[in-house]
Image (cartoon, rainbow, N blue to C red):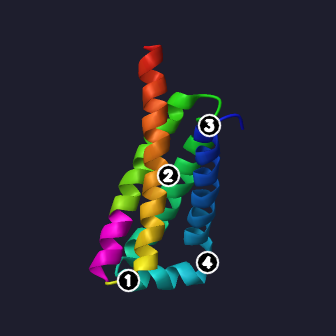
């Protein structure tokens, strides 16, 4: 990795790949989504996070592909923050979603600026 944007992309991609796989395979995640009062969203969340992770990885050689992936993860993290506030989760859960939001917002804006400069 030769720049901070690529590092952020890889960090986000790895984290969301792991969380997405966990959503699909772990009993603990079933319990989490019940706690969120959204059990019907566990599978779609996992699939979308794995897809976005793939988009971030593919965005390393093809940066334009990182745009929809990072934006999608930003939107998911806004939803995650809303859910955590709604269920009155501890602040640490909210902070985790906020940190992921900021990380993907950074990737999105950096890749968007690169794209616009080349256009």
Using the numbered discs, state the Cα–Cα distance from disc 2 to disc 4 in whole angstroms.
25 Å
Q: Residue at image x 34%, y 81%?
A: 37
Q: Secondary structure at mark 2?
A: helix
For the N terminus, the image quarter is: top right
Using the numbered discs, state the Cα–Cα distance from disc 1 to disc 3 in whole angstroms.
34 Å
Q: Secondary structure at mark 4?
A: loop
Q: Secondary structure at mark 3?
A: helix
**Residue marked by disc 4:** 26
The numbered mark, 2 or 4, whose residue comes first in the sequence reads 4
For the C terminus, the image quarter is: top left
Q: Main secondary structure of the magenta part?
A: helix
- Is residue 8 among the parts visible in the rendering? yes
Span of residues in magenta = 79-87
Query: Relative to the observer, which residue lies in front, 39 or 62?
Result: 62
Whether residue 13 is in magenta: the answer is no
The numbered mark, 3 or 4, whose residue comes first in the sequence reads 4
**Residue marked by disc 2:** 103
The label number, if any, that marks residue 106 in the structure image: none
The label number, if any, that marks residue 89 in the structure image: 1
In the rendered view, would you say 103 is above or below 64? below
The numbered mark, 2 or 3, whose residue comes first in the sequence reads 3
Using the numbered discs, state the Cα–Cα distance from disc 3 to disc 4 in whole angstroms.
26 Å
Q: Are marks 3 and 4 in contact (CB under 8 Å)?
A: no
Name which quarter of the figure residue 41 lies in. Answer: bottom left
């Amino acid at each position: 990795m030769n720049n901070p944007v690529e590092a952020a992309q890889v960090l986000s991609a790895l984290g969301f790949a792991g969380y997405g796989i966990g959503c699909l395979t772990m009993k603990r995640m079933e319990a989490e989504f019940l706690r969120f009062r959204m059990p019907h969203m566990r599978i779609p969340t996992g699939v979308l996070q794995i897809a976005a992770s793939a988009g971030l990885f593919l965005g390393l050689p093809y940066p334009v592909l990182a745009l929809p992936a990072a934006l999608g993860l930003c939107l998911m993290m806004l939803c995650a923050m809303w859910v955590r506030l709604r269920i009155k989760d501890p602040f640490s859960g909210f902070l985790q979603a906020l940190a992921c939001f900021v990380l993907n917002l950074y990737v999105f804006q950096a890749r968007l600026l690169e794209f616009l400069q080349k256009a």
